[in-house]
Image (spheres, rainbow, N blue to C red):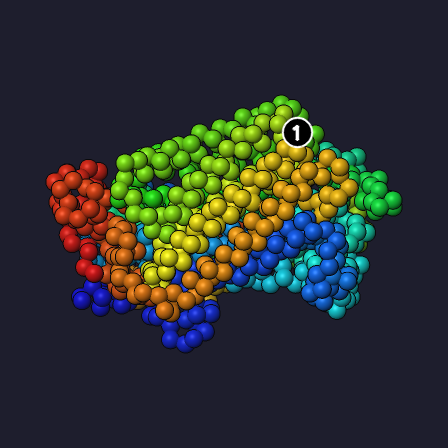
Amino acid sequence: MAEATHDEVHRHPAPKGFIRKYIFSLDHKVIGIQYILLALTAVVVGMIMSVLMRVNLSWPGSKWSILGTLFPTGAPGGVMSDSFYLSLVTMHGTLMVFFVLTTAPQGGFGNYFLPIQIGAEDMAFPVLNMLSFWVTFVGFIVLLTAILAEGNLTVGAWFSKLGASFAGGTGTVGPIGGWTGYPPLSALGPIAGPGQGAGVNLWIISIAIFCVGSLLGALNFITTLLNMRTRGMSLMRMPLTCWAWFTTAILALLSFPVLLGGGILLLLDRIAGTSFFIPGGLFVSGNLVPQHTGGSPLLWQHLFWFFGHPEVYIAILPGMGATSHILSTFARKPIFGYRAMVFAIFAIGMLGFFVWGHHMFISGMSPYSAIAFSILTLSIGVPSAIKTFNWLGTLWGAKIRFTTPMLFAIGFVSVFVAGGITGLVLGQTSLDFFFHDTYFVTAHFHLVMGVASIFGMFAATYFWFPKMFGRMMNETLGKLHFWITFLGVYAIFIPFHAMGMLGMPRRYANFGEYAFLKNAHSLVLFVTIAAIITVGIQVVFYFNFFWSMFKGQKATDNPWEATTLEWTTATPPPHDNFAGVIPTVHRGPYEFAVPGAPRDFVMQTEPEGVEVAAELGDRSGNGGNGHKH
Amino acid sequence: MAATVTNTEGVATAIGGGPRSRGGNGFPKNGGGRDGKDGEPLRFTPARYRIGVWMAIGSIVMLFTALTSAYIVRSASGNDWQPIAMPKVLWLSTLLIVISSVTMEVSRRSLKQQRDARYGRWLMITVALGLGFLGSQIIAWRQLVRQGIYLASNPYNSFFYLFTAAHGLHLLGGIMALTYLLLRTRQRRSTIDGELRRVGAADSATIYWHFMDVLWVALFFLLFFWK
């Protein structure tokens, strides 16, 4: 134990009090779990909103007395108003994109496992790490307040005292504007209609706060990964999860400031009377808007989508990393084409900065720039295909262990391909002219960015739960959860494509007036029933998650027989991750089925010579035994 | 035990620019993880602060790039764009912040040469110059307000106030960092690790301060000399 005493000087001791240990903790593991719990909370709200939307679309005008009781102005007499529906669209999107798909994959699992997988004691800047969570949490609270400011007359009245641009309590359930908040309507304030008052101000403030939190996190991830890798952990020996988190952090670092800048401009237009996005001579609801001149609504679209497109990769890349990691582990084979996977993930991330225009094909942009954006967009298909074929190559001929995490990882590949393939349709200007703002788009991005990322996170949860909480999740419940969710999401989103081809526009509260959509109503009903079942089965997941935390079967240190550093340490890991004995890495992350090795997996810490094959490219030159666990 | 400094040689090599810390941007040149013998605890590497501050600079550059592109687009999108005459006091601001960059550099070099008293003195001068810059900016604002030039009077004014406010806030962050250095890093530390952190913090604060200087000069040119 000489090393342990040696190291005492460097380590900050584990905190004792409840508040420093669980609330304002500096430990990346606790912060990671906090992020996951935040996402688990936000996703429930987001899911309830999606069910409410489905109910309104399927049975328009029906009375739900509970809605009338909860939202007397938004659903008078229990009948959901159209503005209620529109605010559900807005808040569902905002909650899911920011507080679920951006927090859990990166802030949650990334925070917990990136330092352990590279052999670090903690993040580079623990205080910034704590701040990044709590700033994000404040953003979440502000977003919930936005709901109350529009939906609740009392809270709305408080905000109305702040001035005309903060008038609230319009009786919707929250701000209206979609998660993209397009001006000029989003920039005008209460004159633009219901749900445009205090709620939208708070919505912008919430997003701005979220940007700051994400920036702190991204800075920390990049520094940790570049500076704190343990001995022998060269970049090309990192697990693919780390590459994914690293790329995601770069995307966040470069894209969130742009949204922050745009958000500041939008807020100034609303509350300070500037004209960044509001053109002159604008008529809204029959009234001239006199005080603004010369602004450009398209400017917002450029700023927003310069962030917005990288944001979808921020959501999906960690899922790709987790999938690669888990597929290799349960296929008991090295990942097919490790280097190609690294380059592909980086290529996807970097190309993501040059394709934002494909969200704006119908904005009247020059056809020449549209073609350029189109070609760049379609070229993302190349690294995506490299990843897909490498995943399939990993599975090819493998003796697969069909555990729940593996099922979800395979499910990820399936929904990623199913959702990604329509990207090739929407990325073409001519086809996008028809499909823009239809359910086809909704189907595309829900499958490829929403469901696929969530599948990645489910896989990650089932996979790492034993390391995080020391107990296994129940496999039977897990498989039940997988199959119903897997079939459920296809039952929801395949019909969406058909609706889109019929021309059904997204974000509409009611289709009753459109004769050409009459025949689609049975599809709408089918989707709603599928959605209710799919949302319902998530109860099993929640039950499994919290029940297993206390009653699950005890986990060993390496229950999946995996190779990376998190499986070398105790379960759950001690405060400084490795109890003072920092591991030394001697090999790559996916050494399964190595010829001549005693077992079918070789830990990253095992020194050279356990197998016959000579190891190439080792530069650490230590040769000692770093694995002293 | 091992971390207590018994010979100053180790400290000098560690902070005075061994092969790892000399020049460069602080990024690791080889991809091979951290140094050290097997079983030894891992040492703090001062590149950590530098990488962190470069990342922060990267994101701030993106923020100002976004605002600058908005500025350029907006200047061409309406016929209501009316630049103002430059308040002359902004020349003073520019002079102050450029000088503060020099004093900051003097301060950092004094620390490298282990002249701690001189380090603290020049740090204090830098903080004073930074506060002077902010004061001069506020004077410029007040002059404009007296002329009836407000945030919403004209899109050009909106951008002027926005840019100066955003830069000022970031500079205020820099002043807080320098104040932290003044309060916490003037004492020499007893451990190698502590010394590395002390010098690393001063280094990264210097990088940030120079960046604030460059950023202001760029904004100054954008606002008043770019056509």
What residue is rendered at 23% in x and 61% in y? A581
The answer to whether residue A499 is visible is yes
Camera-nearest residue between A301 and B219: A301
The answer to whether residue A149 is visible is no
Camera-nearest residue between A275 and A549: A549
Task: Quadrant for residue A109, please give it.
Answer: bottom left
Camera-nearest residue between A90 and B138: A90
Instruction: Tell me the amino acid under the disc marked 1.
Output: Phe
Which residue does the numbered mark 1 point to in the structure image? A433
- In the drawing, does residue B66 fall left or right of residue A117? right
The spot of residue A533 in percent (x, y) is: 54, 53
Residue sitting at the far top: A368
What residue is rendered at 22% in x and 38% in y? A617
The spot of residue A176 in percent (x, y) is: 71, 51
Q: Quadrant of the N terminus of chain A?
A: bottom left
Position above or below: A47 against A336: below
The spot of residue A326 in percent (x, y) is: 34, 47
Position above or below: B149 against B81: below
What residue is rendered at 17% in x and 48% in y? A599
What residue is rendered at 63% in x and 36% in y? A500
Q: Quadrant of the C terminus of chain A?
A: bottom left
The spot of residue A574 in percent (x, y) is: 31, 65
